Image: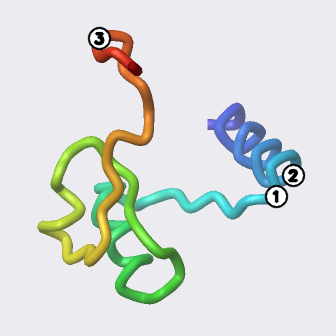
């Protein structure tokens, strides 16, 4: 648990971002942030965020080795 706190503080300092730890489902927390107007969209590879009420969903933000880039 101590290592998680260390990594969180390092991310917040180095990358100057806010780290939010969800109490349970990450998609539910992200959808709540979208609905509250704190963030623009939820980035995920599945559609769970839509079931939690997110109005904007971003998919395929990473490149898979199995897919061709070109």
Asked which quadrant contains residue 42, the reply is bottom left
User: Which is more foreground, mark 2 or mark 3?
Assistant: 3
Report how far apart the C-alphas of labels 2 and 3 lie in the structure.
34 Å
Relative to 25, residue 70 above or below: above
Secondary-structure class at tag 2:
helix
CA distance separating discs 3 and 1: 32 Å
| Residue appearing at x 17%, y 66% in the figure | 50
Task: Confirm or deny contact between disc 3 and disc 1 (CB under 8 A).
Answer: no
In percent of width and height, residue 68 lies at 33, 15
Residue 66, labelled with which disc? 3
Mark 1 lies on residue: 16
Horizontal and vertical percent for residue 16?
82, 58
> Could you tell me which residue is drawn at 30 percent across and 58 percent down?
27
Residue 63, position in %: x, y? Answer: 42, 25
* Residue 61 drawn above or below residue 21: above
Quick check: 20 above or below 68?
below
Q: Quadrant of the N terminus?
A: top right
Label 1 to label 2, Cα distance in Å?
5 Å
Q: If the image is split into quadrants, where does the C terminus sit? A: top left
Comparing labels 3 and 1, the label whose residue is closer to the camera: 3
Please identify the residue farthest to the top as the structure is shown.
66
Task: Give the tally of numbered discs.
Answer: 3
Q: Which mark is residue 13?
A: 2
Q: Are marks 2 and 3 in contact (CB under 8 Å)?
A: no
* View extreme (bottom): residue: 36
Residue at horizontal 70%, vertical 36%? 2
């Amino acid at each position: 648990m101590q290592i998680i706190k260390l990594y969180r503080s390092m991310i917040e300092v180095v990358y100057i971002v806010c780290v939010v730890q969800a109490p349970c489902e990450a998609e539910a927390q992200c959808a709540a942030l979208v609905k509250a107007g704190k963030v623009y969209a939820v980035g995920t590879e599945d559609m769970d965020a839509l079931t939690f009420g997110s109005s904007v969903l971003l998919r395929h933000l990473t490149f898979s080795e199995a897919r061709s880039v070109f």
